[in-house]
Each structure stands twice: as structure tokens, then as C-alpha cells.
Image: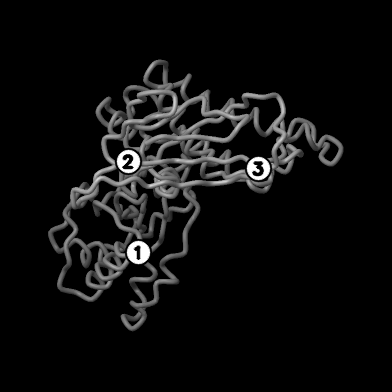
């Protein structure tokens, strides 16, 4: 894959799983719709005199039929004179994608604390710069002023720090887990990466108790909940979806009848990992039908049942988690 850009700018660094053959040529092991690569730009000139800049990516690959092909993508972006306008047009997903790769690369040669600090410092620096642009409009002391386009950037920054490659210390995840998760995240496209960092959380027990005639109505169950332990009711049943797996979370005070209907009469009382299979009752069939439909919409690789707290959840004092 060869990457070029217009006059006045250059690509200063590349991030992802590849081998850099020259300043603009990347050798890729495999490319599909689930792969993405990040690049950082720098100015070659103090001031850009053009109104637009151009980018071009050419991919030389072998198709499944054996043909050698070249796919070329060309994009144009406007040059703005107002720094505030650049902030307003910022793409949070792209920024998070670059930050994630930078932090994971940092973790390979430094302490985990240093890798997490990279994210925190970049976010604080960017938002402080934006606040300095609006000193007159916003006089709120030491508070950071968030542009609308970046209002979720601190949240995703926290999610990066809590992700498997960067979370806690050596005892919180094995080296194999960190490496596998890190190399996976280095190659993920933006949408899948954002979902992995901030998964979906749905409550399903109330929906399962409704009449079976409503089983085709996914609007009720697909209402996303904030990803915090405060969202977990000890009497509830939840599904956690990060794009790679669906985790069925059982509250400690969940009705035994629901657990029995979903897991069978011989389910383990401690609700450790169990095989979730369709049972001969309406509630189980309803859940599995919904899971199949959800798979068709989003796709995933595993479906497991758990009673412990998910790693991505914010810690609090919820006794039911």
C-alpha cells in the first residue's frame, strides 16, 4: 500500500500491523474490511497556501480469484484558517483510533502508567488549547471546555485506559491476553474499535417476561444503558455486547425461575461459565431468537453467561454487581 499527500504536508508516522518498506510504502500481511491503519500528518511548510489538500492511497493486492489488482482511493480535505473550525469538524472516532494505537505502541517499550499518561496528556493538551481559543466566552476557572465534536473524547480516553492491553497492572491481565487484545485493536476499523472500547449494555429480563406476542419488537430491548455499574440492578438480567462476544450477566437477586428457564434445571448456583443452549420453554426460545437476530445485525464470535462484573464497567458501590 502506497500513500501520498499533497504539497505542504507529509505523513510523519504510521500505526498498525505492517512492515514499512519506505517512507510511503507499507507491506501488509492481509487486507479486508475488518482492517484499518492510522497515519499522522505534519506540515512541511509553516503556512499552507492552498485551499485544499489531497490524499491518495493505492493498494496492490491479489484477489481471491488469483488476479493482481490495484485499488486507488483519492480524497480531498479543505484547509481552514480558523483553528476553532478545525476543532468543530474534528472526528472523534479517528482521533480515538490514533490515540489507541499510540498508547498500545507505547506499552511495548514503557510502563503501563506511561502508556496511559500518553492518552491523558494528549486529551488535556488538546482541550486546553480549545479553551484558550475561547477565553472571553468561557470563564469557568480551571474547567475544560469541550467542543461539541469532541464531547465524548474524555470518555473514550478513559475506555482506552481500561481496555485489556492497558488496564491496571501485570496481575490484572496475562501477557498473552494483553498482546492478543493489543494486536487486534491495532488493526480494527474505527466503528468496531469504538464499540470494543465502549460496548452496548441491554437489560432483557423485563422484556423476556412480556407476552410472547411481543418477541419481534426489538425496540424495547435494544435501548442502550450507560456502561456503568450503576446501570446494573441485582434483580436484572443483562446482555453486554462488545462486537466480539455477547455476555449474559445474571444479577445476584435475579428470579431463580428466569435462570432455570434459560440455563436448565441443573444450572450451577454460582453461575460460573456455562454453555448457553436453547431450552424447551418459551423464555429460552425467545432469548435465543433475539440473539440470532442480533447476530445478523452486529455479528459476534462468542455467547457466554457470567455473574461477575465486566471489566469495562465503571467501579462503584453497587452491591448487585
Q: Which mark is residue 52?
A: 3
Give the CA separation, mark 1 to mark 2. 31 Å
Q: Nearer the viewer, residue 12 or 315?
A: 12
Q: Please report whichever mark, 1 or 3, sits nearer to the chain's N-terminal start.
A: 3
Whether residue 212 sits left or right of residue 97 in the image: it is left
* Quarter occupied by residue 288: bottom left
Residue 42 higher or lower than 309, as above or below: above
* Number of the front mark, 1 or 2: 2
* Quarter occupied by residue 137: top right
Q: Which mark is residue 200?
A: none
Give the CA separation, mark 2 to mark 3. 27 Å
For the question of whether residue 236 can be seen, the reply is: yes
Q: Residue furthest bottom?
A: 213
Q: Residue at x 52, y 23 (%)?
A: 117
List x then y, in percent, for residue 134.
Answer: 80, 37
List x then y, in percent, for residue 82.
Answer: 76, 39
Q: Residue at x 36, y 58 (%)?
A: 238
Q: Nearer the viewer, residue 57 or 153?
A: 57
**Disc 2 on helix, strand or loop?**
strand
* Location of the N terminus (image quadrant): top left
Q: Residue at x 41, y 67 (%)?
A: 221
Residue under label 2, please give it. Answer: 60
List x then y, in percent, for residue 212.
Answer: 31, 80
Q: Residue furthest top?
A: 110
Give the CA separation, mark 1 to mark 3. 38 Å
Residue under label 1, please give it. Answer: 297
| Crowding at mark 1 (Cα within 10 Å: few <14, some 14-19, many 20+) | few
List x then y, in percent, for residue 273.
Answer: 20, 48
Q: Residue furthest left?
A: 266
Whether residue 204 sits left or right of residue 47 in the image: it is left
Amino acid at each position: 500500500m502506497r500513500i501520498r499527500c499533497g504539497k505542504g504536508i507529509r505523513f510523519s508516522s504510521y500505526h498498525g500491523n505492517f512492515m514499512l518498506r519506505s517512507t510511503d510504502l507499507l507491506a501488509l500481511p492481509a487486507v479486508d474490511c475488518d482492517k484499518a491503519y492510522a497515519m499522522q500528518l505534519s506540515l512541511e511548510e509553516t503556512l499552507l497556501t492552498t485551499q485544499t489538500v489531497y490524499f491518495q492511497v493505492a493498494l496492490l493486492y491479489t484477489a481471491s480469484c488469483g488476479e493482481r489488482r490495484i485499488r486507488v482511493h483519492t480524497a480531498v480535505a479543505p484547509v481552514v484558517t480558523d483553528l476553532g473550525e478545525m476543532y468543530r469538524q474534528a472526528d472523534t472516532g479517528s482521533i480515538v483510533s490514533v490515540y489507541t494505537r499510540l498508547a498500545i505502541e507505547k506499552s511495548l517499550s514503557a510502563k503501563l502508567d506511561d502508556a496511559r499518561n500518553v492518552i491523558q496528556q494528549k486529551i488535556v493538551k488538546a482541550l486546553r488549547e480549545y479553551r484558550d481559543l475561547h477565553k472571553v466566552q468561557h470563564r469557568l476557572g480551571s474547567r475544560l471546555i469541550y467542543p461539541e465534536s469532541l464531547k465524548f473524547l474524555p470518555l473514550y480516553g478513559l475506555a482506552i485506559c481500561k481496555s485489556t492491553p492497558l488496564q491496571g497492572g501485570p496481575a490484572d491481565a496475562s501477557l498473552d491476553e494483553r498482546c492478543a487484545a493489543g494486536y487486534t485493536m491495532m488493526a480494527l476499523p474505527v466503528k468496531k474499535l469504538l464499540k470494543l472500547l465502549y460496548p452496548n449494555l441491554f437489560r432483557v429480563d423485563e422484556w423476556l417476561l412480556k407476552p410472547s406476542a411481543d418477541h419481534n419488537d426489538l425496540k424495547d430491548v435494544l435501548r442502550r444503558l450507560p456502561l456503568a455499574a450503576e446501570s446494573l440492578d441485582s434483580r436484572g438480567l443483562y446482555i453486554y455486547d462488545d462486537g466480539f462476544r455477547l455476555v449474559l450477566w445474571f444479577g445476584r437477586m435475579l428470579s431463580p425461575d428466569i435462570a432455570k428457564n434459560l440455563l436448565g434445571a441443573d444450572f450451577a448456583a454460582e453461575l460460573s461459565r456455562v454453555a448457553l443452549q436453547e431450552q424447551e420453554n418459551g423464555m429460552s426460545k425467545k432469548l435465543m431468537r433475539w440473539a440470532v437476530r442480533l447476530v445478523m445485525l452486529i455479528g459476534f464470535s462468542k455467547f457466554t453467561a457470567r455473574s461477575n462484573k465486566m471489566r469495562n464497567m465503571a467501579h462503584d458501590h453497587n452491591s448487585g454487581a
